[in-house]
């Protein structure tokens, strides 16, 4: 049986830290589905379509990695995809409390899958999408923190909002 894991998130935008977690997850599972959440209650910086394009561009056509979008409960999506695990990245101890609560709530919704916490390479332990957006908005460089297409899109967006 194929071991499928889901790596959910808003990926607004995808960072090199996210990509590091995707590749670490691929070493553990036969397939990793990067699941971009559609959350109508949030106002994302980039549209769902843009985020999907950025991710697909970043992971290319690597065997065993898919990029999709989903809405609703993660536990329901996991069941639909026949996934055995959800992947979550932990950058610092401060991430743990929230992620632990989410893992327990997901387990309550669907007891048939586990949450696997992965730590990114130390180069990315401080990196977050919100930090990248803020640096870009303020005119700073995000080179080396995000894939090149994301860097270009952030620059364009920052120029049009100044």
Image: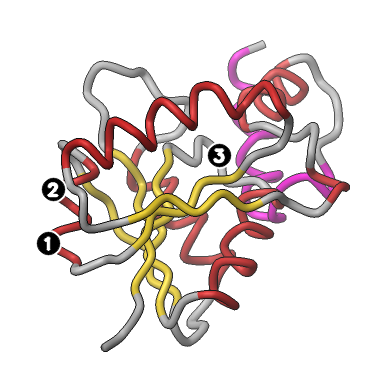
Q: Secondary structure at mark 3?
A: loop
Badge 1 crowding class, 10 Å Cα cut-off, few under 14, some 14 to 19, many 20 or more, is few
Depicted 15 relative to depicted 126: above or below: below
> Residue shown at 64%/34% (left/top)?
156
Depicted 98 relative to depicted 6: above or below: above
Q: Main secondary structure of the magenta part?
A: helix
How many marks on residues?
A: 3
Between discs 3 and 1, the one toward the N terminus: 3
Q: Nearer the viewer, residue 128 or 51?
A: 128
Circles 3, 1 touching at the beta carbon (< 8 Å): no
C-alpha distance separating marks 2 and 3:
25 Å
Marker disc for residue 20: none
Q: Nearer the viewer, residue 53 or 67?
A: 67
Q: Quadrant of residue 106?
A: top left
C-alpha distance separating marks 2 and 1:
6 Å
Depicted 64 relative to depicted 101: above or below: below
**110 lies left or right of 92:** left
156 within the magenta span: yes
Q: Secondary structure at mark 2?
A: helix
Q: Which residue is mark 2?
A: 76
> Residue shown at 55%/22% (left/top)?
97
C-alpha distance separating marks 3 and 1:
26 Å
Q: Nearer the viewer, residue 23 or 108?
A: 108
Q: Give the mark toward the camera: 2 or 3.
A: 2
Circles 2, 1 touching at the beta carbon (< 8 Å): yes
Which residue range is magenta in the image?
Answer: 143-161
Q: Which residue is mark 1?
A: 80
Q: Which residue is mark 3?
A: 13
Q: Quadrant of residue 66?
A: bottom left
Badge 2 crowding class, 10 Å Cα cut-off, few under 14, some 14 to 19, many 20 or more, is some
> Residue shown at 18%/52% (left/top)?
77
52 within the magenta span: no
């Amino acid at each position: 049986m194929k071991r499928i894991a889901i790596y959910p998130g808003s990926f607004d935008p995808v960072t090199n830290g996210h990509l590091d977690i995707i590749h670490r997850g691929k070493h553990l599972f036969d397939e990793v589905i990067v699941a971009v959440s559609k959350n109508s209650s949030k106002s994302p910086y980039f549209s769902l379509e843009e985020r999907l394009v950025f991710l697909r561009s970043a992971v290319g056509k690597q065997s065993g990695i898919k990029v999709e979008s989903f809405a609703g409960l993660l536990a329901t999506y996991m069941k639909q995809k026949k996934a055995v695990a959800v992947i979550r990245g932990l950058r610092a101890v401060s991430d743990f409390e929230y992620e632990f609560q989410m893992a327990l709530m997901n387990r309550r919704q669907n007891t048939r899958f586990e949450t696997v916490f992965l730590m990114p390479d130390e180069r990315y332990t401080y990196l977050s999408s919100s930090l990248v957006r803020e640096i870009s908005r303020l005119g700073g460089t995000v080179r080396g923190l995000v894939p090149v297409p994301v860097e270009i899109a952030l620059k364009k967006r920052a120029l049009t909002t100044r």
